[in-house]
Amino acid sequence: MGFTPFVFNKVVVALLVTSICATKINVPRLRLSYKDLLSTNRSSIFSGHDGQLSLSAVLLDEYRDRLFLGGKDVLYSVMLSPVSSESKEIYWPPLPGKREDCIQTGKEQTECANFVRLLQPYNRTHLLACGTGAFQPMCAFIYVGHRGEHVFTTNPLNVESGRGKVPHDPSFPFTSTFSGGELYTGLTADFLGRDSVIFRSMGGRTTMRTETDQKLLHDPRFIAAHVIPDNDDRDDDKVYFFFTEKASEGGDKEEAIHTRVGRVCVNDVGGQRVLVNKWSTFIKARLVCSVPGPHGIDTHFNQLEDVFMLRTKDERNPDIYAIFSTISNVFQGFAVCVYRMADIREAFNGPFAHKEGPNYQWGPYEGRMPYPRPGVCPSKITNQPGKEFGSTKDFPDSVLQFARSHPLMWRPVLPALRQPVLVKANIPYKLKQIVVDRVEAEDGQYDVMFIGTDVGTVLKVISLQGGNSLEAEEVTLEELQVFKVPIPITSLDISVKRQALYVGSAAGVAQVKLHRCETYGKACAECCLARDPYCAWDGSSCARFVPNSKRRFRRQDVKHGNAVLQCVDQNVGDLDVTEDKVVYGTEKKSTFLECVPRSPQASVTWLVQRDDRKEEVKLDDRVMSADQGLLFRHLFRQDEGVYICRSREHSFSQTLAHISLQVLQADTVDELIARDIAGISDGFKDRSPGNHRPWMPCSTGPYSRGQIGQSRTWFKDIMQLIGPSNLPHVEEYCERMWCNDKLRRKHKSMLEKYRQAQESARKARSKGSGERNRTPRDLRLQPE
Ligand SMILES: *[C@@H]1O[C@H](CO)[C@@H](O)[C@H](O)[C@H]1NC(C)=O
Ligand SMILES: *[C@@H]1O[C@H](CO)[C@@H](O)[C@H](O)[C@H]1NC(C)=O
């Protein structure tokens, strides 16, 4: 008795291992092609009036229900609902002569255009637009009218310099945010692209910038900028910049790249004697995104690719989602880390990084701190009795000197839960853009990530935390091929109000619905297996889950995808196929039984039923399980039987196909072919006596896939050439090679004859034996 628990545990462990291995991790639950998305109205694309948009800026205006786009020498205003329904265009080339000047300076002709890089809402009637203007940055106000009217005009003569607002070079990294009538930018502000700077311009105040000093910014690549309040005192508002730069504290590794979050006070006006019109409150900290590696050495993802600020009800505490990459000769990896504002503030409130001299190590600054603490905004908090700091101009010089010499914090910012929410290593594509939607589901709240890649796809992913394991479990719900060609996605915007994504690339902008629950299937189990927080089984279909709605009947299990539990009283059985399909194979030849599960995450098993016994199909060199079905390379008479294809996903199994395989005797077939083929001459020009082409069915109705492989020679060759996962191509190939109309008709009549012969033989055999009559129901032989 004492052994029982032990044995039991072993069994449980074995089951667990099997179930874990059976789940294919990192494979999307659903893959939707470009065609799928268009044909189901999930997506629609706008590519400009002549398809030459060369998209370089996007502004989603939810208030006006419009999408503003900037491209090469062009601006668009597109009314949403649906996209591409109504659009207006403004042609906006460089100023006269600038294109020629640009070419004169040795730039490429293609770069000497006005690439719009900035689109910001300026006031109630106008947008601010800035473009590279053929390496002469320029800005203009665009009249867009009030909500409800569709106007889109600009005065071509009313153009201002865009220096400090956008970079000269269309390819240089750049970020901007517009707040309180002022524009904050992170960019290189000169022709050569060497003057890296954080700028503030427009509004009533004098222009502010960073001092030129590698301590402050060292070859930065700016990714994002956001104004985030600290508390209810507007004087404490800060602008946060996310960027990478060369890290001087990297020690020996001189060229180490680190990701930073830097900030300035909105009310910073610079110093009185030092730092005049230069930021006096700029400080920065390292953002760390890493995973523990072997031998205790962490793998760091240092290169920042994109940042998304997920707003919450508390405007002071958005969650910061960031994509990172690390690319080396041996390893290419991507990770998504999430940062809490509390952790960012804590790093800024901690010690400053300090180095005593060139031969010293970096450490925390432990000396006396000037007051007010550098990096703090002049506000009620900094005021002391009899000592008020109305502006940064009132700060003592010691404060400004310290800020100038100690811009970096000692402690880095670690991600929430101290680890990435998503890691992808050695994948054949890159992660480029991210937006996140916080979704209310039956079993909790989920952050659904939409991630744009460099191959025109968007991944819809959730990360499940907690449970028994510390590791986050990633579930890729969908992979959407948004663009026809594999081009990089350059922008992603989300409208929660419209439940849509706006996906930008050089090919245009696609409006893509966040969800389409019907796609998952018509059964409760399929809906539950999808694990999509947007979707739930409502008793009759897979539909959008609306939290707190009156509907009581809802089945959803995002955490576990346990369809058995959720759908025990539902129409699970509906999924199982009951109809038999008949496939004929020829003895000694190869044949293929098709069975493709809806989800690539499902695993497939084959059973064979003979008489009353069901057993698993033994796989070997002769009988192989391929991506799309079961392949017999050399058919035996004993292979005849009913083959049952079952898929399994998250402990939920279903029968996908019941295929009755009938093996034609080689002699009979040869005889038939010899007799029938004599009548066809044009189909087989190269036919020589005694070397008949074997019977080859053409794609008509139910025969299509199951019988493509009847010929030993060429089928094997083709399979080897293009592989079993490309079977549809084999089919196409065969169709072209073998199936002209005359042959097709011939095959049908041959098959009919054979079927009749088999049928009468079977009837004779089964008379009185009680065998279930498996007359194929779907064997249709009508001409097309
Ligand atoms: C897609 O939209 C078009 C036009 O609005 C409509 O005619 C068509 O039925 C829709 N197709 C689907 C699958 O919803
Ligand atoms: C918005 O700004 C533009 C450009 O400065 C100006 O012409 C227009 O009058 C402003 N509109 C409003 C409503 O303030």
Image (cartoon, rainbow, N blue to C red):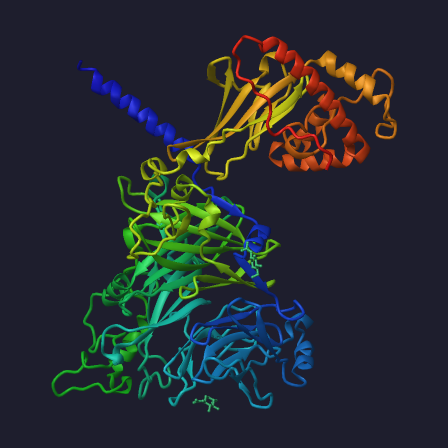
Image point (56%, 61%), residue name: 44
Look at the image and tell me in which quarter the C terminus lies. top right
> Which residue of the protein is positioned furthest toward the front in this rendering?
768
Query: Percent from the top left, x then y, of residue 258?
Result: 40, 59
Left/right of residue 159 with respect to residue 232 in the rendered view: right
How many numbered circles does the render carry? 0
Q: Quadrant of ligand 1?
A: bottom right
Left/right of residue 49 with respect to residue 459 in the rendered view: right
| Above/below status of 430 relative to 600 | below
| Above/below status of 133 relative to 304 | below
Is any part of residue 332 visible from this angle? Answer: no
Query: Percent from the top left, x then y, of residue 313?
Result: 28, 66
Front residue of 426/127: it is 127
| Above/below status of 200 relative to 72 | below
> Which residue of the protein is positioned furthest toward the left in this rendering?
385
| Above/below status of 163 relative to 621 | below
Query: Percent from the top left, x then y, of residue 265?
Result: 31, 77
Q: Quadrant of residue 547?
A: bottom left
Left/right of residue 345 with respect to residue 77 in the rendered view: left
Left/right of residue 251 with respect to residue 775 in the rendered view: left
Front residue of 87/226: it is 87
Q: Quadrant of residue 294?
A: top left
